[in-house]
Image (cartoon, rainbow, N blue to C red):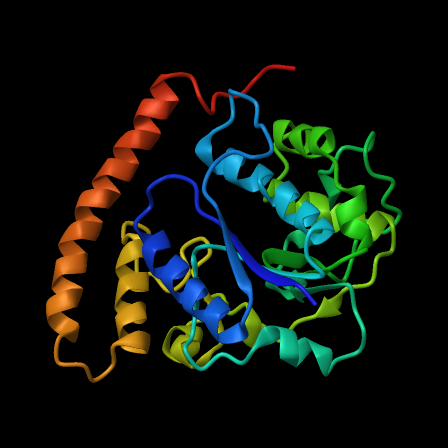
């Protein structure tokens, strides 16, 4: 059985260094191939921002099940803890499933996202769902219906309409419209900050997801700062060179954060990411 762990890392955000390193180490422990999508494979419109280009690449992730029997997709802003179990082995012990994700509906407001989907694309009869899945962690098996139904032109339309979390809401719309079963993952496999207690418990989870402003004290704090500290705490705990390496990485991250911010400004000035009137 062929398996791959896939992630997307477009641009030069220094936080990816820690996510990709932990994901690559994890793939080695699982005995699976690791695939890093670091360029536009799908073919995004030239007007798209870097963020939208990255979102669009998840269509390619869905299609990788044509080449592998099983896919585990992880956002690159995820740290996989060194003690995380082999996901592929773990899921074999559950009821047979073709798709598995974490249900974040309880975080609130997700039904409003679904309502904003264009009616020309979706015939969702249940506009008040009890499930809304986070696509930062996705398990996909060959033959799953979501991979067959997702279309580039539809996702681009959803993005153009300003739907919140567009690729995530689009996939959830497909799941609802077609009544596609999904195995709900336990939170430890996609651990985001949901309340203040989560800040202290995050290092005891399997997949730590730094989505949005998770685990940051203030919005001005760079994601690379908290991911850097957590990475060294998880992977270099007790090592004598830990603080020396941490200091070197801190200065490198600050420099690369500045470059990343500059690159986004240049891209915006060049006309990328501007809203296209329809």
Residue 37 sits above or below residue 208 on the image:
above
Residue at image point 62% right, 32% down: 159
Q: Nearer the viewer, residue 11 or 222?
A: 11
Asked which quadrant contains residue 55, the reply is: top right
Q: Is residue 223 visible?
A: no
Residue at image point 48% right, 21% down: 274
Count of numbered labels shown in the rendering: 0
Residue 62 sits above or below residue 159 on the image:
below
Instruction: Find the residue positioned furthest to the front.
Output: 1
Image quadrant where one finds the N terminus: bottom right
Residue 183 sits above or below residue 271 on the image:
below
Asked which quadrant contains residue 246, the reply is: bottom left
Q: Is residue 233 visible?
A: yes
Residue 38: % across, % down: 45, 42
Residue at image point 66% right, 49% down: 64
Residue 162 is left or right of residue 11, and the answer is right
Residue 249: % across, % down: 18, 58
Residue 246 is left or right of residue 51, and the answer is left
Residue at image point 33% right, 45% down: 13
Residue 167: % across, % down: 63, 43
Image quadrant where one finds the C terminus: top right
Asked which quadrant contains residue 189, the reply is: bottom right
Residue 111: % across, % down: 71, 51
Q: Nearer the viewer, residue 241 or 50?
A: 241
């Amino acid at each position: 059985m062929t398996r791959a762990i896939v992630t997307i890392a477009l641009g030069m955000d220094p936080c990816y260094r820690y996510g990709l390193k932990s994901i690559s180490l994890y793939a080695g422990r699982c005995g699976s191939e690791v695939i890093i999508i670091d360029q536009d494979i799908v073919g995004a419109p030239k007007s798209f921002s870097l963020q939208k280009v990255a979102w669009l690449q998840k269509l390619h992730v869905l299609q990788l099940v044509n080449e592998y029997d099983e896919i585990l997709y992880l956002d690159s802003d995820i740290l996989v803890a060194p003690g995380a179990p082999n996901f592929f082995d773990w899921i074999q012990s559950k009821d047979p499933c073709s798709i598995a994700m974490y249900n974040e509906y309880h975080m609130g407001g997700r039904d409003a996202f679904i309502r904003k989907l264009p009616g020309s694309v979706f015939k969702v009869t249940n506009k008040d769902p009890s499930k809304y899945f986070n696509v930062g962690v996705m398990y996909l098996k060959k033959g799953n219906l979501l991979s067959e139904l997702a279309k580039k032109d539809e996702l681009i339309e959803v993005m153009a309409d300003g739907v919140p979390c567009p690729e995530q809401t689009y996939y959830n719309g497909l799941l609802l419209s077609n009544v596609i079963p999904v195995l709900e993952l336990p939170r430890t496999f996609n651990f985001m900050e949901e309340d203040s207690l989560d800040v202290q418990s995050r290092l005891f989870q399997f997949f730590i997801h730094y989505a949005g402003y998770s685990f940051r004290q203030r919005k001005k704090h760079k994601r690379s700062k908290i991911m850097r500290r957590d990475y060294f705490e998880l992977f270099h705990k007790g090592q004598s060179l830990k603080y020396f390496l941490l200091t070197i990485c801190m200065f490198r991250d600050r420099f690369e954060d500045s470059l990343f911010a500059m690159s986004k400004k240049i891209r915006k000035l060049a006309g990328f990411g501007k809203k296209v009137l329809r």
